[in-house]
Image (tube, helix red, strand yellow):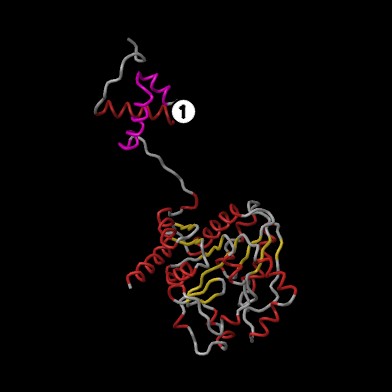
Amino acid sequence: MNRKERPMEQPQGKERWDLLAEMAHLYYNEHLTQAQIGERLGTTRFKVSQYLLDAREEGVVEILIHLPDNRNRQMERRLMDRFGLRQALVLNNRYLSHGETLRQLGRMASEELARQLSPGDRMGVSWGKTVQSLLPAMGDGAFPAVELLPLNGWASLENPTLEAGALAQAMAGACGGKAGVFPAPLYIQGKQLRQDLWAQPALMGLREAYGRMKAAVTGISSTSTLAVRHPLWRQYLSPPLEGELVGSVFGRLLGPQGRRDDGPLERRLMAVPEEALLSTPCRMGIALGRHKGAAVAAALRSGLVNLLVTDVSLALAVLAEEERDSRQ
């Protein structure tokens, strides 16, 4: 009786290991089907299937999956479950410098947006270095030619290339799209002037375009980088509100638990209307550094951000912040 016809006995010890290794080799390297392996070794397809499962459980076979961008999928699921997010992307950056972490976060964010957008769609952008981190990855031909809309007026930043309008122009150039213009400062002096500005044709057209955005991208600021620390804007605060604030997102100031500030600074804000922002399917926030734990937790609680791109240390800080608050 040849091997093909001989019924297979249950092997033990080294013989079993050799058999599992042979089956795994035929299946994974030689690409034989389970039925073909059973025919060759004198057993059934169902037993081959069980042996292949045993090979993995007993360590004969080890499957190594190279996940893209070194993402921490467990942490992503925890954030999504805890805050009801549409998605979370968490970078394992233990051995990365701050600059390399920012670069990889920008690439992750850009690639995710490219999957969600089509040519001609509208995407809003806020200001800052984290938003700017998307720019290098948008010029490789993989990002669709979209229309970029600045989400707020100019903020008189020391680095003008980080302004929302400048970033919209640069991103449009990188992806072959076009850019809108927000012809107003971030904050204005009076309520009536704010109403008059929104009534201007240029801003009326921009406001209409905001209502048809597919995505909006923002950084998330902590109290160390809030706009209220800028001398130009401090004059509008009476009394100073720093102690009541934990962060800002899309130009909106946030208190603990995601509470929105309705102080004098907020009432002078020239930025995307909240109703247009909340109707945008993808509202992406990008942040890094565990010192922003309270700010990011507030941004997620506020509902203004439903997709988070961050590093693992900040993700841990955000979850710790949420757990601490839930116990209080």
Report x, y in % for residue 280: 59, 63
Quadrant where the image shows the C terminus: bottom left
Q: Nearer the viewer, residue 29 or 276?
A: 276
Q: Which residue is mark 1?
A: 31
* Predominant SS of the magenta segment: helix
Question: Which residue is drawn at the image coordinates 70% and 64% (left, top)?
Answer: 179
Q: Look at the image and give the residue range highlighted in magenta.
A: 34-59
Residue 58 left/right relative to 237: left
Label 1 Cα neighbours within 10 Å, binned few <14 / some 14-19 / many ≥20: few
- Residue 288's place in the image compared with 51, above or below, is below
Report x, y in % for residue 69: 49, 52
Q: How many marks?
A: 1
Q: Would you say residue 45 sits in the magenta stretch?
A: yes
Q: For the view shown, which residue lies furthest in the top direction? A: 1
Report x, y in % for residue 289: 45, 67
Q: Nearer the viewer, residue 103 or 5?
A: 5
Question: Which residue is drawn at the image coordinates 48% and 84% (left, top)?
Answer: 241
Quadrant where the image shows the N terminus: top left
- Residue 229's place in the image compared with 278, above or below, is below
Q: Nearer the viewer, residue 311 or 210?
A: 210
Q: For the view shown, which residue lies furthest in the left direction? A: 13
Q: Secondary structure at mark 1?
A: loop
Report x, y in % for residue 312: 42, 60
Q: For the view shown, which residue lies furthest in the right direction? A: 201
The quarter of the picture where residue 148 lies is bottom right
Q: Would you say residue 302 sits in the magenta stretch?
A: no
Which kind of residue does numbered mark 1 sit on? His
- Residue 72's place in the image compared with 64, above or below, is below
Question: Which residue is drawn at the image coordinates 48% and 64% (left, top)?
Answer: 98
